[in-house]
Structures are given as structure tokens and as C-alpha cells.
Amino acid sequence: MAAPLSPAPLPAPRTIAVVGLGTMGTGITEVLATAGREVIGIDVGEAETARCVAALAAATARSVERGRLTEAERTAALGRFRTSTDLAAAADADLVIEVAPESYEVKQQIFRELDAIVRPTTILATGTNALSVTRLAAESARPERVLGLHFFNPAPAMKLVEVVSSVLTAPAAVTAVTDLAIGLGKEPVAVGDRPGFVADGLLFGYLNQAAAMYESKYASREDIDAAMRLGCGLPMGPLALLDLIGVDTARTVLEAMYAESHDRLHAPAPILRQLSEAGLTGRKAGRGFYTYEAPGSAVVVADAATPAVGGTGTAGRAVRSVGVAGSGTMASGIAEVFAKAGFDVVLAARSDDKARTAKDRIGASLARSVAKGRLSEEDAARTLERIVPAGTYDAFAEVDLAVEAVAEDLDVKQELFAALDKVCRPGAVLATTTSSLPVVALARATSRPQDVVGMHFFNPAPAMKLVEVVRTVLTGDDVHATVHEVCARVRKHPVDCGDRAGFIVNALLFPYLNNAIKMVQEHYASLDDIDAAMKLGGGYPMGPFELLDVVGLDVSLAIEQVLHREFRDPGLAPAPLLEHLVAAGCLGRKTGRGFREHARR
């Protein structure tokens, strides 16, 4: 059934009813009332409406204190808001926004009752973030006026609003609510009707994978969260975010998404059910993945799962000198990190010229730090003096730690580790910066696999604080302790993980990026809308397509192929669109074209 066209544009909604006055509904009423709209707040009981009135009064008072509202504007906003426990109060509304619990039965009952109450031209919007808007619209007597209007929590602060059309929705209704969102100071993104829409469709799959990673005891909750904050620049780690959202809420959303998509990435991790059924629903309960000072508190307190201060107690090996193998950006960055921290560094490449070029790159980086006032000229000079370039790995004979940062190719790295095994003194720690290859395969290329460990730095190494410490089943306890001690000396944050594809960051990041590509491939949403949704709704510093073009589409494809081979989940298969772009030589910024056009460097 095609959506009927309205004969004329619908008037801009002036009187708006909000049905459901929980946290989200209350936030939406604040947005509307302070933007000059007449607002009717409706909920089932007096206690709920009273809480909303008190919350609105407190929120607007804080806005006055912070200079965002005048006292006269606050008074006017409160005067435009009234409440009711009777759905009939929505009779005069131009727009009704329901934000009731995520249940088809509850929402469909509300829509059926509204059909008998509101005017024929009134737009009915659902605030669902997971249920089918089409299914809800089909229950209405006028499905052409039903759409989704998905605000993000906290609604007053979050700029993103997803405007969700079904195949039944009239374009005039979409235009009216889109204009409203713009008038509220929001950034509307037009999306179609599919589980989770854009932002939650990408976000909740990532959160679910993080919960499953923790449940499998692959990494601690602290390390998973630190890895995603420091490795991706996210404001919160995924497990802390699940506690904030509510473990039960996340489970409900994922259940609804899985029922529609049947994608295994949306099948809720069992730990979400276990925590929900135990009442450990996150901050609001005082305990979820973490334990909090009190229900509703954001202050995390130590519990039985909190790592012991001081680590395992195993002493590491002494490290005074470091060898860095490679001549690219990563090798130069790592050498700079160690030299700044006072280590003597041998920077070795396949030729003297390559090694000197790599040192020159470090000199240029230090000069930029001096120009920006981050480093004195004396410290920059001392740092550069500590770095000795060499055209052969024989120069690593006396180093205490050798770190390789050569091409991400298993044969190349195995050959290098076999050479390091012969050159480096007994007791030297051999580390790889691989981001996708099995560390144990490199360890087995040596006669001392107990001395081999992963030290995955992030690019640019001088700026990024994270190091993933990858321990194989053969890595010695003292080698693991050594790497932690070295990370502390170079002021990096180490996170522990096992030797499997993607480690922590890439295993969580790249399925999210792959799913974003699939959305574009399926013509569900545009590049710009997806990037905007994840920056504004998910707090990401870059949208997925911005990030893919920076990382490189060939690099991204290689990582996704490794993840697919390791875990054999059909949902991890690289999107065909990514494969096509790489085959065409469209690799991102470095080639001038990826998902977008870029000026060649």
C-alpha cells in the first residue's frame, strides 16, 4: 500500500502531547516547553505526572543558574506545560509523541485509543528505538499520519532526532516533524523502518558484543571499557554505558531487534538476561556490570571483580634499551615514545637510508611539539640524541626489548622474529605490534616463545594512550609483567587480552563499521546521515565513514576478513560494497577517494 499524499502541507505543530513521563518523556517535555510549544504531559498516575512537574521545575531552575534561560523564560515555559492522567487530554494536540514502555501491546493500545480522541490531521509519533513503526502504524485508523520520532537520552542535551518513515507514512507528516525538530534546535536524520534505526542499530550490536566479550572472560570489564575509550575516543566504555542505559532496557531493545533482524549480533548475550533477572540492572539498581555507591549513583566502588592494585606481584625484567624494527609511521612513533621516556633506542630498518628517514620523521614530529609549546627545545634535542638509526637488525644485539612494527604480513613478521631470535641476547623481550595476526605464530618462529608478547600501539603512537598487551598461552609471567612496567614508564595505559583476532578494540570496532557499510549498501541511509547519527547520538568523535576513509579501506577489509575467518560468524563477512571499493583502488584519504572524495596529499 502506497502512502497517500496530503493535499496540502500540515501546519507546524504548536500544541504537543507527550504520552509517558519517564526519563525520556520528561526530557522531551523540557525541550518542547522551553522552545515555546504548548505541552500536555500524560501518564497513568498522579505520581508519574508529579515527578515530571518536579523534574521540569528543577531542570529549568538549573538552566537559569547556568544562564541558559532567564527567570521570565523559565516562568513562561512552566506556564506552557500541563499534565493529565487521561489520554483524552490529547484531543487538541497537533502532534502526539508516545514514549511508553517498549511493548507492542502497550503502544498499540495507546494508538487505538488516540484514534478516537485526536483530530484527523493530528500526527502520531512513536518514540520507540527498536519496535517496527510499520507494525504500529498498521494498527491505526490513519496509518499515513504515524511515524517514528526517536529522541536520544538525555533529550535536552542530545542533538540527534531520528525521523522514521514507514511505507505508509505521508510525506507531509515527515516534513512537519522534521521542521519541528529543526525548530527545537535538533538535527533530524531521515531513516527507514528497520530494527534500531541507524544509531541504536549500530550501537546496540556493539554493546552486545562487548557484553559477550566480558562474559567469555576474554578481558576484564575495566580493560574493555578503557580500550574503547582510549583506543576509539569514546566518552564511555561499552559496559559502563550498558549500566547507564539499564541492562534490562538494553536486553529489551536487543530482543526486539533480534526478533526483526534475526542477526546473531543482536541476539542478547546471556549475561544480559542473567543480570536483568537478578535485578542487577545497572546504575539505577546500584549494581550491574559494575557496583555503585548507591542506586542511581554514578560513583563506582570496588567489588570482588575489581583488579588488585599492584598487579600479580610478578617482577618484570630490567629494560634500559629498546630496539624498534621498521621505518614507517608506526615504527617512528613508537621510537619517539620510548626515547621521550628516557630509553636508549635503536631504530633499525632494511637500509641505512630508510632508518635515517625514519629518524628524520621523528625530528619533524618533535619540532612540531616544540612549536606548539608541548616540549622544550632541549628535551627535543635530548630525545633525538637517544635514537640511533641502523640499517641492520644486528644492531639489536644488546637491547632489552625489541618491538617490531613492520608490514602486517605473517610471512614477513615470522621471518623477522626468526632473525631477532638469533640476534637478540638471551632474556630480551620480543614484542609485536600486530593488530590482526596471531602472536603465537610469531612466537613459534623463535626458539624462545616464552619471551614473545604482543604490544599493540595505536596510531599516532605519541598521542594515543592505549597499548593492548597480548599474552599467548606460551608467554612468561615475567614477560607480561615487563610489558606492564614499560607501559607505565612510557605513560601508556595497558589493557590485557588474549591472542585472538582483533584483540579488544578491532574486534568491537570493525563489526560496527561493517554494519554501517551494509546500511549504505542496502540504501537504508546516506553516508552523511549515518555519520551524523553516530556522532550526535552515540558520542563518537568521527562517523564510521569518516573513520573508514582515515584508516584505509584496504586495511579495514583485511581486518574484517581476519575476524570473519577467526569467528566464522556470517554477520562478520565483509560488506560487498567495501570489497568493490578496494578492488577499484578507492582506499580512502590516501588515494583521494574512498567513501568520499578527498584532496590528494
Image (tube, rainbow, N blue to C red):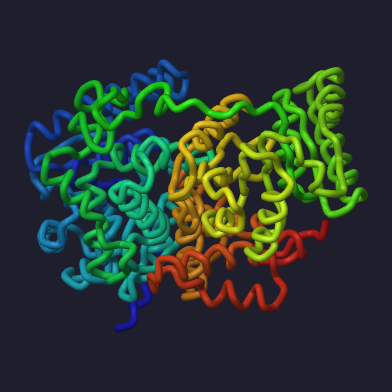
Q: Residue pushed farthest top?
A: 65
The answer to whether residue 183 of the structure is visible from this angle is no
- Total labels drawn: 0
At a point 25% along the width and 52% down the height, the residue shown is: 96
Q: Quadrant of residue 80?
A: top left
The answer to whether residue 588 of the structure is visible from this angle is yes
* In-front residue for pair 13/373: 373
Q: Is residue 390 left or right of residue 463?
A: right
Q: Quadrant of residue 247?
A: top left
Q: Is residue 430 left or right of residue 173?
A: right
How far across and down, in percent of the image, does residue 276 sit?
Answer: 16, 45
At a point 23% along the width and 47% down the height, the residue shown is: 17
Name above or below for residue 119 compared with residue 312: below
* In-front residue for pair 220/470: 470
How far across and down, in percent of the image, does residue 283 sit?
Answer: 25, 32
Q: Residue pushed farthest right?
A: 353
* In-front residue for pair 575/404: 404
Q: Quadrant of the C terminus?
A: bottom right
Q: Quadrant of residue 455?
A: top right
How far across and down, in percent of the image, does residue 320 sit?
Answer: 69, 26
At a point 59% along the width and 66% down the height, the residue shown is: 558
* In-front residue for pair 179/343: 343
